Image: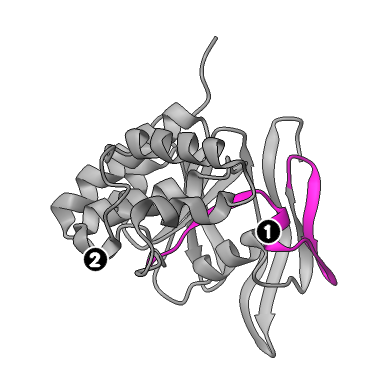
């Protein structure tokens, strides 16, 4: 790990019984990077994302964030103590809660006034300033994605993880929304790791693209596309 490394995945192996899903994988990202893991279904990319979030234990290796070890064999910091936001593939919006309360879910411990300010700021950020009283089933697919992003950002995460965030949308909307999300993350300066099976999606969003095959990192490339770091 270098002094500029923010997320460090070091020789990680993840298995379910005798089934090894991720094998001896290493990857490091600097602060502010927008990165993607690309690969077909079953290659281990979502399992790795879940391990970074704290939902899967490691058999070998370690995962660190800003120099703090979050996971190693026999040790896992609970997900709620990692300050990591996650945007799930199915969004997991609560249908019985309106938009504002969906966003509020992760920040209920804050004073009510701060909650309201944070919710409105996030609704403004994702371009849905007047949608707080609406319910998820009243929103379009693209609007639901924006609310899912707002909820993931509500707790000021150090790292944002996105699991196939646009897979349920048609190709035109996926392209538009990927660009909008990229711009939002740049403004917020949040280090982000996304998993996808779409090369186009990875290229639109990410400055670092890792290709996974059968649980291993087969290739990694860097582009000039996307970083949230600001040049002084």
- Image coordinates for residue 45, horizontal then vertical, percent: 51, 66
Foreground disc of the pair 2, 1: 2
- Determine which quarter of the picture holds residue 25: bottom right
> Where is mark 2, residue-wise?
137
Q: Residue furthest bottom?
A: 18
- In the image, is residue 100 part of the stretch drawn in magenta? no
Q: Quadrant of the C terminus?
A: top right
Residue at 40%, 67% (x, y): give it.
94
Q: Earlier in the sequence, mark 2 or mark 1?
A: 1
**In the foreground, 165 or 39:** 165
Residue at 59%, 45% (x, y): give it.
159
- Image coordinates for residue 226, horizontal then vertical, percent: 42, 33
Tag shown at residue 80: 1
Residue at 29%, 37% (x, y): give it.
129
Q: How far is mark 2 from mark 1, CA to CA?
A: 27 Å
Q: Is residue 227 visible?
A: no
> Compared with residue 41, is residue 128 higher up or lower down, i.e. above or below?
above
**In the foreground, 23 or 108:** 108
> Compared with residue 74, is residue 172 higher up or lower down, i.e. above or below?
above
- Determine which quarter of the picture holds residue 89: bottom left
Magenta stretch?
A: 65-90
- Asked which secondary structure carries label 1, the reply is helix
Q: Residue furthest right?
A: 74
């Amino acid at each position: 790990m270098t002094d500029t490394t923010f997320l460090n995945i070091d020789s990680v192996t993840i298995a379910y019984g005798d089934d090894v899903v991720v094998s001896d994988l290493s990857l490091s990202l600097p602060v502010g990077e927008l990165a993607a893991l690309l690969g077909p279904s079953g290659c281990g990319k979502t399992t790795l994302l879940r391990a970074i979030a704290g939902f899967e234990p490691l058999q070998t290796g370690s995962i660190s964030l800003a120099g703090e070890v979050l996971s190693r064999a026999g040790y896992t910091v609970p997900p709620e103590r990692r300050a990591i936001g996650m945007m799930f593939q199915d969004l997991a919006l609560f249908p019985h809660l309106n938009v504002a309360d969906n966003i509020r879910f992760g920040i209920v411990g804050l004073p009510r006034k701060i909650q309201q300010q944070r919710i409105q700021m996030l609704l403004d950020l994702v371009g849905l300033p007047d949608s707080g009283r609406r319910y998820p089933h009243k929103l379009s697919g693209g609007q639901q994605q924006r609310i899912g992003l707002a909820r993931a950002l509500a707790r000021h995460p150090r790292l944002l993880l996105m699991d196939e965030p646009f897979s349920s949308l048609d190709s035109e909307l996926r392209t538009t929304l990927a660009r909008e999300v990229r711009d939002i993350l740049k403004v917020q300066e949040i280090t982000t790791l996304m998993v996808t099976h779409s090369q186009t999606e990875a290229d639109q969003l990410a400055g670092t693209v890792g290709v996974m095959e059968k649980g291993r990192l087969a290739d990694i490339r860097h582009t000039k596309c996307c970083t949230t770091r600001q040049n002084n």
